[in-house]
Amino acid sequence: MSPSDLLPALPFIIVSVWAILLLLFDLFISNKGITAILAAAGVAAALVAVIARLGSYQVAFNGMIVADSFSDYLQIVILATALLGIAVAYDYLRRMNMERGEYYTLMLFTVSGMLLMSLAGDLILVFLAIELLSLPLYVLSGFARPEKSSEEAAMKYFILGAFSSAFLVYGIALIFGSTGTTNMAGVAQSIAGDQADPTLMIIAVPMLLVGLGFKVAAVPFHMWTPDVYEGAPSAAVAFMSVGAKVAGFAALLRIFVAALPELAPAWGPVVIAVSAATMIWGNVAAIAQSNIKRMLAYSSIAHAGYILMALAAASDPTVADKAVSAALFYLFAYLFSNLGAWAVVLAMERSKGGGLRIEDYAGLGRRRPALALAMAIFMLSLIGVPPTAGFIGKFLVFGVTIEAGLIGLAIVGVVTTLISAYYYLRVVVMMYMRTGEPESRSEGWLNRTVGLTALATFLLGVLPGPILILAGSSGFITP
Amino acid sequence: MIPGVSMTHILILSGVLFTLGTLGVLIRRNAIVMFMSIELMLNASNLAFVGFARSMGALSGQVFVFFVIAVAAAEVAVGLALIVAVYRSRSSIDVDRVSDLKG
């Protein structure tokens, strides 16, 4: 290791060192609001470090860490999610009587895992990163302890999460046996040179898909999602519904597009099937939900399906770069629309799980016009109605899917989008066309987050240019 | 190195352990036993790593085992704490009885 190795990993190092220091400082801070601000400062410093190195390509630690434009882009998304996640938690934790400094340190630890995931150039590092991001998330899900539902969510998430990582690590072991290396570039070379044992590969690749499919909540590995999203504290869900998905897709895209491109004829059809099943089941099951947290959980499953559609398109090597760019833009759009929608849920939530039924939103358009307008923008963006960020995201993903020749998959995508309009618009109808006396909170940081995400969702739809260029130049993944 | 033990033997043993672990998670309903089964799955992959490292003469596979062991230890710390918390509030760790969340 040379000191220059540290530079590409600087954002990760900043966040993880800051998390350890904050764990210590927190003992001496009685006002936990200061802990939140310090945590946000650490994240902001990491964001500066990412932006400072934007555009350069560096490999460090003998290929363990690959910092390219793909990882830069994902790190920006992850750090933006973290900042918004801290902002929504600030008032929520105080109001729900669970303001403890550990919340922010745990968030920093999981953010460091997510950053490491986007930098990982070696399969064993993917496994370490997934554990580093998951273990704090298990604890965050149980943060509302001694609330029973929160404990249950944490236990379910933990058992299924650990179960899925066992599949991932076994898949990695078999790839190591097949190719003699866990380095992604080495794996790609070994397969291209016909030196890999195909029998082991046939078992290993589906195992990787199972392990990472759990993390991004793809059908049939989605069972934990509704329960965890419903039981865990909403502020933690707002953060992890975006952060864990971005990190999961960072690993999926890098492994499948950069390390296993030669096997695309084998994994392509599987990803197509998983993507179609995820879109169909996520959207259909969301219709039946009366609890907004469960509805958004199924909605997040459905969105995993749309991003998987881009991965399926990436199995065609001629459009792989474009497909990855589409997935990257989609993740940015999803960040603002989904986190914004969760921020509105946070504003409506009362203690003891009150204010979470969709009927509780009746009359919000009259009582809180700005909040209702923001929620309407998020819902329209999640459907994919222009002029919102979601529309551009869906447009790119569907476009590249058709370009890859997967017309059937694109049709499934369009039909399920139409189905999704039903349950998203139900919230809008409830807010504007039903009368009711909704109770909502007006808290500084929560309002600012809702405003900012609504503005970003709208602006990304009207002026997607800069992010499109950034995503477009980040589509090529170096193994 | 024990003569007569080939890579195939090691791989079969590790596959059997992994399958037993998977079945344990799917069939048993006690959270602790499910957790033990997950540990069995992790150790099955450790065995595969060591076996491959031996047959290829590559040290890296043995180093990965340390990573996996460290991660498994961290998982024990978090997992047992969560299970203890659930036991305290419900006096049961049967996962079928811990199921208020559904819909």
Image: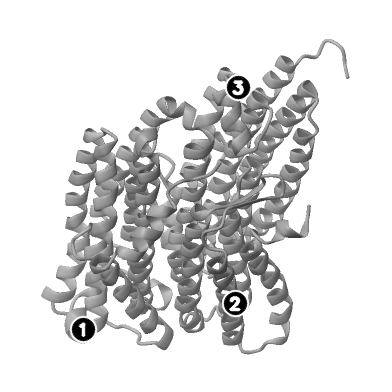
Does residue A105 sit above or below A217 in this rendering?
below
Say whether disc 1 or disc 2 marks the residue closer to the N-terminus: 2
Query: Quick check: do tags 2 and 3 share a chain?
Result: yes
Q: Toward which corner of the image does residue A361 lie, by quadrant?
A: bottom left
Q: Quarter holding the N terminus of chain B?
A: top right
CA distance for labels 1 and 2:
32 Å
* Mark 3 vs 1, N-terminal side: 3
The residue tagged 2 is A39
**Which dot, 2 or 3, sits closer to the camera?**
3
Tag 1: Cα neighbours inside 10 Å, few (<14), some, or many (≥20)?
some
Indicate the amino acid at tag 3. Answer: Ala
Residue bearing mark 1: A369
- In the image, A17 versus A163, the foreground residue is A17
| Mark 3 residue crowding within 10 angstroms, few (<14) / some (14–19) / many (20+) | many
Question: Under tag 2, what secondary structure?
Answer: helix
Q: Position of residue A215 (x, y in %)?
A: 49, 48
Q: Give how far apart the Cα atoms at labels 3 and 1 are.
A: 60 Å
Q: Position of residue A120 (x, y in %)?
A: 60, 49
Name the image quarter holding residue A11. Answer: bottom right
For residue A166, side relative to residue B103 (left or right): right
